[in-house]
Image (cartoon, helix red, strand yellow):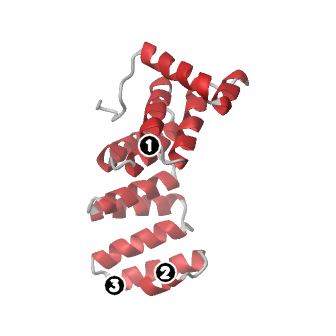
Amino acid sequence: MTSTAVDLLEPEQIAQVVRHWETIDTPFSSALQSGVSPAQALGRLGVRLCLLERYPESLAVLNTAVALSPNDPLLLNNLAVVLDRAGHTDHAILVIQRSLSLSHAQPDSWLLLGNMKKMRGDLAGAQTAYETALALEPNSPLAWQGLGLIRQQQRKFPEAIQCIITCLKQSQPTAPLLAIL
């Protein structure tokens, strides 16, 4: 792992990944032929592979995309999601933090970071991430819910209740949300 939490790839490794997928994946090949950059085509392929729960392949493809375009926040976010789903949450946190250092105004990425930090037991880090998401998107029901759950774990019940009520005002009431309240 590098200081940016992204695997370094040699140019020949990158070319090999592109050639491989170009020969076996029609949507990827079509994207390249239509003028989409290899990094963007690989990013789309990586997301498709993730949705199919083919995490090792998705990670290889997204690492290649990020090697081609290391300052693309969307590619970094997608890589972080796959890393997290593949059970590499600590690495995912580093990658999402890299993305946020490149572009702060990403409320969904702050929300993702909050969820990952909460899962790791870093309540203060999760709280900061949820609060940042809310500063960027004040009507985010998921950020209000996340912050409410943090407040509940911190035993700050009046604040937790207010967060969940705000969440309910921003979304359709569901049985789980009402149960939390």
Q: From the viewer's perspective, tell me whether residue 53 is left or right of residue 83.
A: right
Residue at x 57%, y 82% (from the top left corner): 173
**Looking at the figure, which quarter contains the N terminus?**
top left
CB-based contact (under 8 Å), mark 1 and mark 3: no
Q: Which residue is mark 1?
A: 55
> Is residue 101 at all visible to an observer of this figure?
yes
Where residue 175 sits: x, y (%)? 52, 84
Mark 2 element type: helix
| The one of 134 and 83 positioned closer to us in this rendering | 83
Where residue 12 sits: x, y (%)? 44, 13
Report how many numbered discs are placed on residues in the image: 3
42, above or below 126, in the image: above
Mark 3 element type: helix
Cα separation, mark 2 vs mark 3, equals 15 Å
Residue 157 numbered mark, or none: 3
Q: From the viewer's perspective, tell me whether residue 172 is left or right of residue 100.
A: right
- Could you tell me the amino acid type at mark 2? Leu
- Could you tell me the amino acid type at mark 3? Phe
Residue 177 numbered mark, or none: 2
- Could you tell me the amino acid type at mark 1? Tyr
